[in-house]
Amino acid sequence: MSFKGVDYFCVDSLLSEEELMVRQTARRFVDEEVAPVIRDCYREARFPRDLVPQMAAMGFFGANLEGWGCAGMSNVEYGLIMQELERGDSGVRSFVSVQGALVMYPIHAYGSEEQKRTWLPRLQSGQAVGCFGLTEPDFGSNPAGMRATARRAGAGWILNGEKTWITNGGISDVAVVWARADDGIRGFLVETGTPGYSISDIHGKWSMRASVTSSLAFADCRVSDGNMLPGARGLKAPLSCLSQARYGIGWGAIGAAMDCYETARQYSILRKQFDDRPIASHQLVQEKLAWMITEITKAQLLALHAGRLKDQGRIEPAHISMLKRNNVGIALECARLSRDLLGANGITDEYPIMRHLCNLETVKTYEGTDHIHALVIGEKVTGVQAYR
Ligand SMILES: Cc1cc2nc3c(=O)[nH]c(=O)nc-3n(C[C@H](O)[C@H](O)[C@H](O)COP(=O)(O)OP(=O)(O)OC[C@H]3O[C@@H](n4cnc5c(N)ncnc54)[C@H](O)[C@@H]3O)c2cc1C
């Protein structure tokens, strides 16, 4: 079934023909390629890897980057792709976010010409998969405490330490790894198979089951100087990558919310209880639908404004914190309300709601938790840093 979209407030009228076309292409891809397989992938805890070449051919990887085969799309077009992909599944959107915003972006922004030439065309075309290693077992919200080290050794570096909760780790060809060197935090490109580098997948997840999540270990792992990202210095480099990814998440969450809302809306019209009346005829049910469509509309406007600001080079990290926190928060609430409206049917995987709900629990936590983004907003409006 093709998705008709959710547009209560003529938000589509704010989009250009080109933007609508990009969205339609991504929408059709999700309807035709993701929707038919995602339930089984989720059941089997399997990432639909065979979709990678098609996503590459449509320019989804690093879509808002210029050069090296990247599509050079606007940030609004990129956001619309993220929205549609997450309507399919947060895990599929996560793959694309990591590949583009967390692997291609740092190479594009901080890499040498040689690194760009080696990796960007391969990552854009899906011939290579990347992952981003920042989180450690003891340092999640506070990456500044990281223990992974990079020690100079002759013409290269020796890496030691551990990264965990790394999306795409087990299927990656290259990892962007952040480690503490004598002169501060530096970024490294570590190829899978490098001696001293090992990867183990994390199992038993009830969230993001259609996404690979792994731990990375570095034991005297030697990389050459050419593997260090020369332009990345200090924590602001990985944080700048997170800003790119969080921007996409702000759009993506709308997709999951739209899928939950639309499923619940249709169900409530068809499902009958008490005197053969649709449950949609009850005020309590309508109030939930009204809440959802209002919040989705506000989220759409927030994302679009963020995209326009980003295209003008005027967006700030604190704007992106509000976008990510608000849109993920309302998406999670939409998933919970939609699940409620489907009654018992809401807990099965015949419907996408419970999958979105479980996924969104991760989306609330990763790329800066809801709390941390609240504190970034709090700092912006008070000038007082509360998270330390
Ligand atoms: C499926 C999945 C995929 C992921 N993919 C990646 C990836 O690709 N790369 C990567 O590097 N990381 C990844 N992560 C890790 C993710 O970014 C971290 O989980 C996140 O940063 C939170 O860290 P934590 O889990 O250690 O929680 P903690 O930092 O321990 O936080 C636990 C709780 O304490 C709260 N808290 C912590 N400090 C404060 C404070 N100062 N004030 C108020 N509350 C606070 C948090 O908000 C949270 O509620 C992934 C995580 C998941 C679940």
Image (spheres, rainbow, N blue to C red):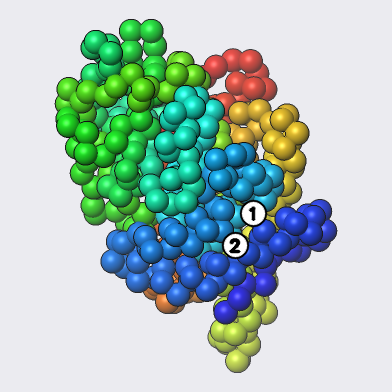
Q: Looking at the image, which is closer to me, 129 or 280?
A: 129
Where is 236 relative to 199, above or below?
above
Q: Answer with mark 2 or mark 1, whichever residue precedes in sequence.
A: 2
| Circle 1: residue type | Leu
Where is 368 relative to 254, above or below?
above
Pick the quarter of the image with the C terminus: top left
| Circle 2: residue type | Ala
Pick the quarter of the image with the N terminus: bottom right
Q: Looking at the image, which is closer to me, 217 or 172?
A: 172
Q: Are marks 2 and 1 in contact (CB under 8 Å)?
A: yes
**Residue 353: where, in percent of width, then height?**
48, 66
Residue at the outermost bottom position: 276
**Residue 302: where, in percent of width, then height?**
70, 44
Secondary structure at badge 2 equals helix
Residue 26: image tag: 2
**Residue 148: where, in percent of width, then height?**
28, 22
Residue 243 lies in quadrant: top right
| Whether residue 236 can be seen here | yes
Marks 2 and 1 sit apart, C-alpha to C-alpha, by 8 Å
Residue at left 57%, top 45%?
Answer: 70
Residue at left 47%, top 51%?
Answer: 125
208 lies left or right of 260: left
Secondary structure at badge 1 equals helix
CB of mark 1 near ligand 1 (< 8 Å): no
Where is 100 relative to 382, above or below?
below
Q: Looking at the image, which is closer to me, 128 or 365?
A: 128
Where is 201 relative to 50, above or below?
above
Residue 72 lies in quadrant: top right
Residue at left 45%, top 75%?
Answer: 36
Residue 299: image tag: none
Mark 1: few/some/many CA within 10 Å (<14, 14-19, 20+)? many
Q: Which residue is mark 1?
A: 80
